[in-house]
Image (cartoon, coloured by chain):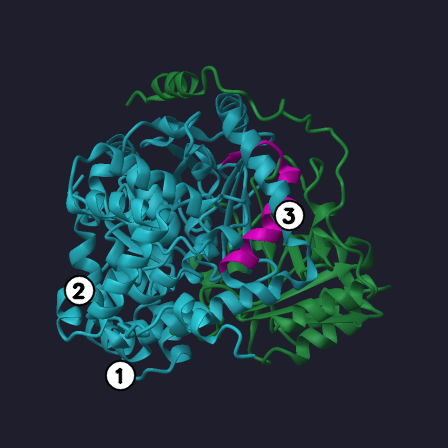
Chain colours: A cyan, B green
Amino acid sequence: MTELKSRNFKRLYKKEIADQKLRANLKKATIQASDKRNDSFAEVDFNFLRNEAKKIKQESVSHLNDLLSQFEDRAHKNNCTVFYAESPEKANAYILEVARKNAVKKIVKSKSMVTEEIQLVPFLEKYGIETVETDLGEYIIQLAGETPSHITAPAIHKSRTEIAQLLHDKIGIELNDDPAFLTGEARKALREKFLSAEMGISGANFLVAENGTVVVVENEGNARLSTSAVKVHVVVTGIEKVIPRFSDLRIFMRLLGRSATGQKLTSYVSLIRGPRTDKEKDGPEEVHIVLLDNGRSRLLGSEHQEVLHCIRCGACLNVCPVYRNIGGHAYGSVYPGPIGSLVTPLFFGPENAPELPFASSLCGNCTEVCPVGISIHHQLLAMRQEIKSETKGGLEKFVFKNFRKTMLRPQRYRLFSRLARIFSSTPIARKAIKGWTDYRDLPQLPSRSFREIYKSNKGKG
Amino acid sequence: MTDDREKIFAAIRRSLRGTERSDALRSPASPLTSVHREDPEPPFRKFRTELEALGGFAESLKYETDASKFIAEHTEPASSIFIYDQVATRFRSLVGSLSESRRLRFGNEFAAGYDKREVASFDAAVTGCAACVAETGTVVIQTDMRLPAALAPKLFVVVEQKQLVASLDELFTDTFGNADASNLFMITGPSRTADIEKQLVKGVHGPRDVLVLFINE
């Protein structure tokens, strides 16, 4: 694996936050998305569904071995091949082996966060296998040579003008920034890929232990084609995606589309049980299901176990004041936003993302909207404590130690608040905390405290 | 290549050792509690409201020949229309009548390994369905050919009233669908994207038009 960019969060966010256009694009898109989400829950009882989903996920991760065994058994009966990979390297090597065995030259791929996590596309391309992203947003990002900046809206940071120029340069279409035109042109280019590819790769939103069903949720129809128009279908997903029963889907289907895009249900849900049967005339001849661990099993039994409940809807990104201002690329991880600030250090090690748990105002918006009840902001706080308890000394520790003392002693508090009021009125104040004032206002504190004003006005009616 | 099954299972066991399990696994046969609030609208009206809100179309027709007339009206005279075997078998009058004005291609003309490009050239496909869900305006199809319904720009779904269920609760039961088939697809309105500046565009890789015809005959 290449070194994670998430180590450089401080440098990355400074670049992004200075981009006013990006911030405006993000704000508009995320506010629109969260408004749609809120409207879509009007007809159902969100809290009831969330509690049910949480119970199912708790049940699933605490019985993970049993459910994986059951899923594997059913999948074998459905003529699928199941492959367990402890690491990204192992998963990639297996997928390459499957591709080579089938003399695959071209792969069509639908959206999958796990394939981003294991950096599958660059790996396959390195071995000369053309691997085409077919979700429109992912296709745009692939042509731009970038990484997604949102879990469900990968090109959220790009304007239509930028996309029009990109498609003009890369696939030679007329320069026209109408989204319908651009979508139509991308459809034409990708249709050709679907018809000529030998292999398809998808993720999975859920794996049903009871009957071995792989559930893939999407809106464009590209996942349906990536899993149907090919000779070999490879599913790549995490071990935590398994749920016990087919009937559990009635809970998750009502939550996922609403949380992700404000839809009651996404346009397509593919329920895949296996390769084509003797009675069917198309569909893949082979289905391989690659189940990735990559740090997930370590989280079981820990205080971070509930992070494994995540269904990757992206709702927490849309409501996060930090994400709204810095966008996904600043996180330097395939998993951005509040949930990414947890998943990245947990999957890849805290040394690879030491700053991410601090990229939160701890306002709790993320926890409020999480459809599976992950207490995201409490988890972030716990991660901060773990990271800080491992570091020694430092100015920050000194400051916070003294802040605590000050807050506990009224006399000391009054002294320091008076000093702060005097200091904030001096010209050096702004310069002294330049890092803070670069992107924010520093309002001048009033010359008298509330207590002083109250005392002087007491009795005046 | 040998996989890491045993290593991963051992790691899971190690991590979960000493932790309390939240619940015993609930039996799959345990009774389901409906989570769907009852709709004041009758199921067909609800189905139509939901589908049309997404840009799809639903109509209740008396006879199969009405459906045939509808399909002819909504396709060009030169269109080539793919007819799934299940439709050809179940709705003979519809197909017979439609064949008088449109060029029809039938599922039984194709064998495994068929030419995908030929199927991609069809202007429309007519399929039956396994169920329809009023709550979300969804049709669920289970067919022996996946591609015609996934590639055609226009998809007609012919439904019998008895196939309409009120909610997703009735769909996700352990007896739903033909267990021997490799797939089930749920289709809720046209293929769509909002990947460019969150502006909704219909018809990306799948059908732009989804027209569902209920036959009461």
Mark 2, secondary structure of its residue = loop
Question: Which label lies toward us, 1 or 2?
Answer: 2
Residue named by callout 3: A49
Q: Tell me whether circle 2 and circle 3 mark residues in contact (CB < 8 Å).
A: no
Q: Earlier in the sequence, mark 1 or mark 2?
A: 1
Front-most of residues B181 and B21: B21
Q: Which residue is mark 1?
A: A175
Q: Position of residue A258 (x, y in %)?
A: 56, 59
Type of the residue with mark 3: Leu
Q: Chain of mark 2?
A: A
Of discs 3 and 1, which sits in the foreground? 3
Q: Nearer the viewer, residue A170 or A314?
A: A314
**What's the amino acid at mark 1?**
Leu
Q: Residue at x 71, y 56 (%)?
A: B133
Q: Is residue A257 magenta?
A: yes
Whether residue B163 is visible here, answered yes or no, is yes
What is the span of residues highlighted in magenta in the rendered image?
A242-260
Quadrant containing the N terminus of chain B in the rendered view: top left
State the predominant SS element of the stretch in magenta: helix
- The amino acid beneath tag 2 is Ile
Image position, residue A337 (x, y; %): 36, 54
Left-right relation of A108 to B123:
left
Residue that mark 2 sits on: A433
Numbered disc 1: secondary structure: loop
The percent position of residue A416, horizontal first and vertical second, equals 26, 58
Instruction: Specify the subunit that label 3 lies on.
Output: A
Which tag, 2 or 3, sits closer to the chain's start? 3
